[in-house]
Amino acid sequence: MLVVGSVNVDLVVAAPRLPVPGQTVTGGDVARYQGGKGGNQATAAARLGATVAFVGAVGADDLGSEARSALAAEGIDIAGLVETGRPTGVALIVVDPRAENLIAVAPGANGEVHAPHVTAALGRLAPGSRDVVLACREIPPDGVRAALEIGRKAGAITILNPAPADDLGAETLSLADVLTPNETELALLVGGGTADDDPESAARHLLASGASAGPRVTDRGAPARMPAVVVTLGAAGALIVQTGGAAVVVPAPAIHPVDTTGAGDTFNGALAAGLADGLDLADAVRRAVAAAAFSTTRPGARGGMPTRAELEGFLGGT
Ligand code: RIB
């Protein structure tokens, strides 16, 4: 499978509460973790045993070298991870005792992941019809669109994690077989307002507007029943919405979260890994919800991402 997206180094402060505008809060010592939604999603999939290639950009600096080594150490093909003249992306994160977070990102090199780079890198990687192409934001919209277009042309399953959800045109959305917004992102995609109260209606609205207009059935053994909007609901799990079918809620197992940073990325990486493995959409979502819950039990975006054995054990015990 192929992941096109961002790489950051995360600087994290655990604080007694998240600051409100104009407020300073004092926390513990700063911790440094590998992050960025794309790198996190690639890592989540690789830990679960998927063969993963990553396309993105870092700076020609120490943080960039660290980020490259961390992805390579997970067994990820980083031939498509280039160095640019801008610094490696950095995320400033505050985590509170409820495991909630607040994130500000300085994208740096991620801002250079434009269509020509994505097209050249995916041209070399040559996705096929049994592949999954997963794209996230935190890179420019033309890079996202190129990734989905190439995936669609190759007959691969295309997944778009619209995080953040701004600057995504209807045409880009229509290139995704599966869209995976959280409730806030879903509200933005449908023009604000409704998603928190009624995510199913908002997702149906998105599907009716032509977003996620992918093929209904893939050519692999298990039909994935695309197109779909899969809304991540945090501790409540996920909601699968497809045209012409009843919505399905997949509840999350009860856990005691330490840090929810990267839970959405774990969900997306695990979902893509499941679909690449030939699971149908509902089964892939079930595993992804469990992987995301497990990931919140350790600090750092990637710290709690489970291996396949850890996930099997967790699923066996829930
Ligand atoms: O989704 C979590 C990620 O968002 C963090 O790792 C941070 O880098 C930001 O990109």
Image (cartoon, helix red, strand yellow):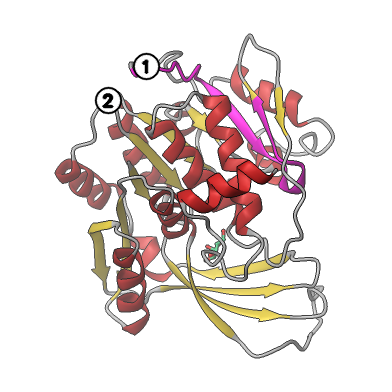
Instruction: Return the x and y of residue 86 as percentages of the image width and height.
Output: 33, 74
Q: Quadrant of the C terminus?
A: top right
Magenta residues (range): 220-240
Q: Residues within 10 Å of mark 1 (few under 14, many from 20)?
A: few
Q: If the image is split into quadrants, where does the N terminus sit?
A: top left
Is the C-beta of the residue carrying label 1 under 8 Å from the nearest atom of ligand 1? no
Residue in the picture at 70% in, 23% down:
248
Q: Which mark is residue 221?
A: 1
- Residue 235 lies within the magenta run: yes
Nearest the eye: 316 or 93 = 316
Amino acid type, residue under disc 2 in the picture: Ser
Residue, x 73% and y 61% (percent of image)? 257
- Disc 2 crowd, CA 10 A, few/some/many (<14, 14-19, 20+): some
Residue 90 position (above or below residue 294): below
Rendered view: 182 above or below 247? below
Displayed quadrant of residue 214: top left
Q: Position of residue 295 (x, y in %)?
A: 60, 57
Mark toward the start of the polypeptide (1 vs 2): 2
> Which three-letter amino acid code belongs to the residue tagged 1?
Gly
Residue underneath mark 2: 129
Q: CA distance from mark 1 to mark 2?
A: 12 Å
